[in-house]
């Protein structure tokens, strides 16, 4: 059975049950990179819709698709997961952002903590992170993209947390994870930076009602902790 690709296309022009792609860069990717052929099925999506299509015809300049199924992008569950992510070094941050989309986080809130290496994320870098999210969405077929907020200080974030929320900080010295600590569909997951949070920052989390949970008996990279922590939460 041939693999069913998912490809992000920002603007989907639908006419009845037909969709035509003539954009040169998208055409090149579909034909030269993905090597689609007539009768192949492929999912085309943007931030609002995902459409299962079948390739009807390929010419030198355009591809025509038959629309087999059209769905609005919506979550399959009622949980809302916000990842409170300390601003990591560039490669680690990008990997963590990828995992956040792949594993179904709803919101990514970059956190300014004491041991981070960069304080600002400019618009050019935000655009790069959006491309990473699109790549993760194509691979995972998670069409509900997470929202990336502007960085905020830990103190400000803790002040703004809603009262009825489950709060977890993944810490190597924490307790074994227990699903009973999740008592709300509004879940906040905190991940520290390279070098960990300071004792003062950890005390602030404890005072704000965060449960401290260990993921493994070993010390994980921050981005690895994001993948494992999110995976555990999504599984329960």
Image (cartoon, rainbow, N blue to C red):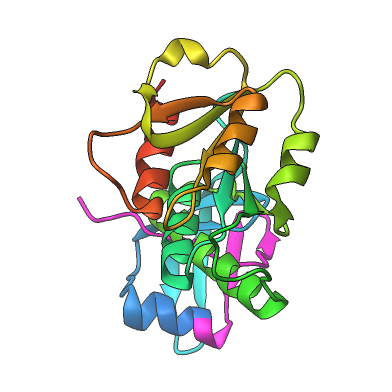
Please indicate whether residue 172 sits to the left or right of residue 69 in the image.
left
**Nearest the eye: 40 or 176:** 176
Residue 232 visible in image: no
For the point 68% across and 65% down, the residue is 13
Q: Residues in magenta?
A: 1-25
Q: Give coordinates of residue 205: x percent, y percent.
A: 61, 33
User: Splitting the image into 4 quarters, where does residue 47 fall?
Assistant: bottom right
Q: In the figure, 138 relative to 21: above or below?
A: above
User: Splitting the image into 4 quarters, where does residue 105 fall?
Assistant: top right
In this view, the residue farthest toward the left is 1
For the point 50% across and 66% down, the residue is 132
**Nearest the eye: 57 or 188:** 188
Please indicate whether residue 181 sits to the left or right of residue 113 in the image.
left
Quarter holding the C terminus is top left
Please indicate whether residue 145 sits to the left or right of residue 39 in the image.
right
For the point 71% across and 76% down, the residue is 123
Label total for image: 0
> In the rendered structure, does residue 12 fall within the stretch colored magenta?
yes
> In the rendered structure, does residue 56 fall within the stretch colored magenta?
no
Q: Give coordinates of residue 224: x percent, y percent.
A: 34, 50
For the point 59% across and 66% down, the residue is 130
In this view, the residue farthest toward the front is 200
Q: Give coordinates of residue 168: x percent, y percent.
A: 52, 29
Residue 70 visible in image: yes
Q: Give coordinates of residue 66: x percent, y percent.
A: 51, 58
């Amino acid at each position: 059975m041939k693999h069913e690709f998912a490809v992000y296309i920002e603007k989907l022009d639908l006419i009845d049950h037909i969709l035509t792609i003539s954009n040169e860069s998208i055409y090149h990717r579909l034909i030269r990179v993905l090597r689609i052929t007539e009768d192949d099925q492929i999912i085309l999506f943007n931030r609002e819709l995902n459409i299962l299509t079948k390739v009807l015809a390929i010419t030198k300049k355009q591809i025509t698709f038959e629309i087999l199924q059209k769905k609005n992008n919506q979550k399959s569950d009622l949980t809302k997961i916000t990842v409170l992510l300390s601003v990591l070094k560039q490669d680690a941050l990008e990997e963590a952002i990828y995992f956040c989309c792949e594993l179904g986080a709803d919101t990514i809130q970059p956190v300014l903590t004491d041991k981070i290496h960069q304080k600002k994320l400019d618009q050019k870098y935000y655009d790069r992170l959006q491309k990473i999210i699109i790549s993760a969405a194509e691979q995972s077929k998670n069409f509900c993209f997470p929202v990336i907020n502007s960085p905020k200080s830990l103190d400000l974030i803790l002040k703004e947390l809603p009262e009825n929320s489950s709060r977890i900080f993944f810490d190597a010295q924490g307790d074994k994870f227990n699903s009973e600590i999740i008592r709300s569909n509004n879940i906040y997951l905190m991940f520290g930076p390279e070098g960990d949070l300071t004792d003062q920052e950890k005390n602030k989390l404890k005072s704000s009602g965060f449960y401290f949970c260990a993921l493994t008996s070993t010390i994980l990279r921050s981005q690895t902790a994001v993948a494992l922590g999110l995976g555990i939460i999504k599984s329960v």
